[in-house]
Amino acid sequence: MKETIQKSFSYKTIVSILFGFLGFAVNFWFTAEFAFPPFTAAVLIGLLFPMLITLTWGWKYGLLSALAGGCQSMWWIWGPSNGYAIFLVVPPFTLWVIWHGYWAGWRKKQNACPWWLSAYAVEIPFRILNTINLLTLSRWAITLNPPPWSWAAGAANTIPMPFSTFVAIKQAVVGYVILLLADVLLNLGFVRKFFGLKEEYNQANTSYIISASLLIGGFVWLIDSIISYLVFQPGNSLFDLLALNIPPHDIFMRTLFILACLIGGLLASYLLRGQHERDKALRDNEERLVQIVEGNPIPTFVIGENHTITHWNKACENLTGCSASEMVGTQKQNLPFYSEERAVLADLVMDGAAEKDISRHYTSKFNKSSLVEGAFEVVDFFPELDDKWLIFTAAPLIDHQGKVVGAIETLRDITELKKTEKELKHHTKNLEQLVTARTLELEDTNQELIDFAYTISHDLKAPLRGINQLAGWISSDYADVLDQEGQEKLGLLVSRTKHMHKLIEDILKYSRIGRTAAEKQKVDLNPLVRETIEILAVPENIQISIENELPTVVGVYAHFEQIFQNLLSNAIKFIDKPEGFVKIGCEDNENYWQFNVADNGPGIDEKYFDKIFQMFQTLAPTSEEDESTGIGLTLVKKIVEMHGGRVWLESTVGEGSTFFFTLLKQGARNERK
């Protein structure tokens, strides 16, 4: 199909003006008249020229052609008889050209135009408005006649209503005749080429049909003239009856017949062109299907009417070992896949089989496609194809009427994927067995460590108790013998044994966290913290406050007790101000609770922030009164992390410290960094 040949602005302008001149000349000197006693209908064929321009190039060029003369001859033709009414009768012809030019431009912008926006349909509202004008405003203007200018001095000031009605009907008929003639001409190839329009599909046949319609009309005109000469009007010459002096009735009937022929030819050309376009679209679709199938690297075959194979691509040849020459044109699509004769998935899909019918052939190995209506996907094993696993999909092919005319099936070899899947399952099973074995070994090792810790604890505590008891006896039995220095040394001995005993207890606590099973429960932290404060020996110069309501969390009660006990005891122990305070607070974040314990103690240098959470590390100088083992914050860190949270601090030396820790809410993901 040829593309549009764009015409230049100057070309369009010159042609528009020339067509305006032609329209003026045809209307002025070649007006066709038809007698309808007592009235005569004048047909202004010259209006065809500006209409061709406006339908082709839009309303702007149509207006230029109309103003150049195509719609102006009526001023001279009807002016003397219409007087003032001429100002209401003639301008609508120019507006008519603009009206159709606007809608023609709108139709060109659309891919598809509904019938109610065709030229013949949009003519209706214009005709209604024009008829109202003729029957009201124009009749009123005539009553103002005669006008002062001499060339219309004889204009009548009354007009019969039947004549106004006749004029309205005549203009409506002429309007549709002009549109019909323009439509006919714009369907001719040489006219479309002249205007630079795209050549329609099957344009030659369209031109032949319209030309044949005109020839039929001309032939009937000739036959009618000959019959009138020989039978009805033998006194007139043949040339008079053919063209020179045709009776009005004969002119009307012959013209009507030619218009009928043109309408028939135009409709026939539209129908034929539509059929050819559909046929071409079908052939184009088939060609595209061939290109898609043959060029597809995925094995693909297509079946058509009677389940006959129409396409069998190269990839399908390579997969099945069957060539296209063997398969195309046959119904042997089952041959490469099955040893017995049976339907393949494409056959079932083409027949519109229900899921229960497909399940009889493929049991539970099929899935219905969520993307294509009526399509199915199957995974199956094929011993006939050298033990291959295939995943294949079949979808129906539907024509423009919604009828299933075939099916397409694609196949993909997933044998290697299945092997890999099998190996992965085997390795997964071995890994699970290995993990189970290692877990049992770890559980045994953990139990041994627990037993060892308790054994060591017992073996260490017994001598410590003996030393403590012996020191008490010496202090009691030899009080009169020991001087002050001896008593102090015995006291130091007792203090060291107690410190050693507490250190052993703390180590046991640390080792038990996460190793021993403990029941988790909902714990309200408000009473837990208050009870912890009561247990601690809080000096009178230190105030402990809970800043806001604490939440209920899920976990081990003793663990939360250890967290607050260690943080609060550390804060109390190291406050060096005359008036000390410890503040406990909590913030509700999206997935976790954030707690803080702040004090106004001596503060901690930033370089020790990590060190204080390590085992046996303490920043305070060792003294006989100091019972710190350096494990408290290590316990806090381990418990918090076990509950999916984290612990950190902020501190300023000389002003105090704030310890922060988080606990996940129930059901939240572990976000600990």
Image (cartoon, helix red, strand yellow):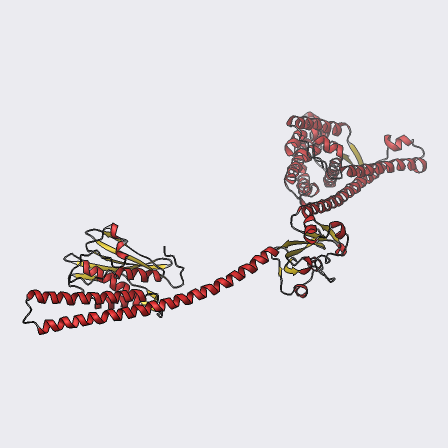
Q: Give the quadrant of residue 657.
A: bottom left
Q: Nearer the viewer, residue 47 or 210?
A: 210
User: How many numbered tags mark residues here?
Assistant: 0
In screen coordinates, is 582 left or right of 104? left
Q: In front here: 105 or 573?
A: 573
Q: Is residue 194 visible?
A: yes
Instruction: Give the quarter of the figure containing the N terminus.
Output: top right
Q: Residue at x 69, y 51 (%)?
A: 316
Pick the quarter of the image with the C terminus. bottom left
Please provide percent x and percent y for residue 19.
71, 28
Q: Is residue 451 above or below residue 390?
A: below
284 lies above or below 613: above
Q: Is residue 215 or residue 613 the one in the foreground?
A: 613
Is residue 89 visible in this depiction of the protein?
Answer: no
**Residue 625 occupies which quadrant of the picture?**
bottom left
**Rendered location of residue 432, percent (x, y):** 48, 64
Residue 554: where, in percent of width, then height?
Answer: 35, 66
Task: Name the foreground residue: 384 vs 68.
Answer: 384
Q: Position of residue 11 (x, y in %)?
A: 67, 26
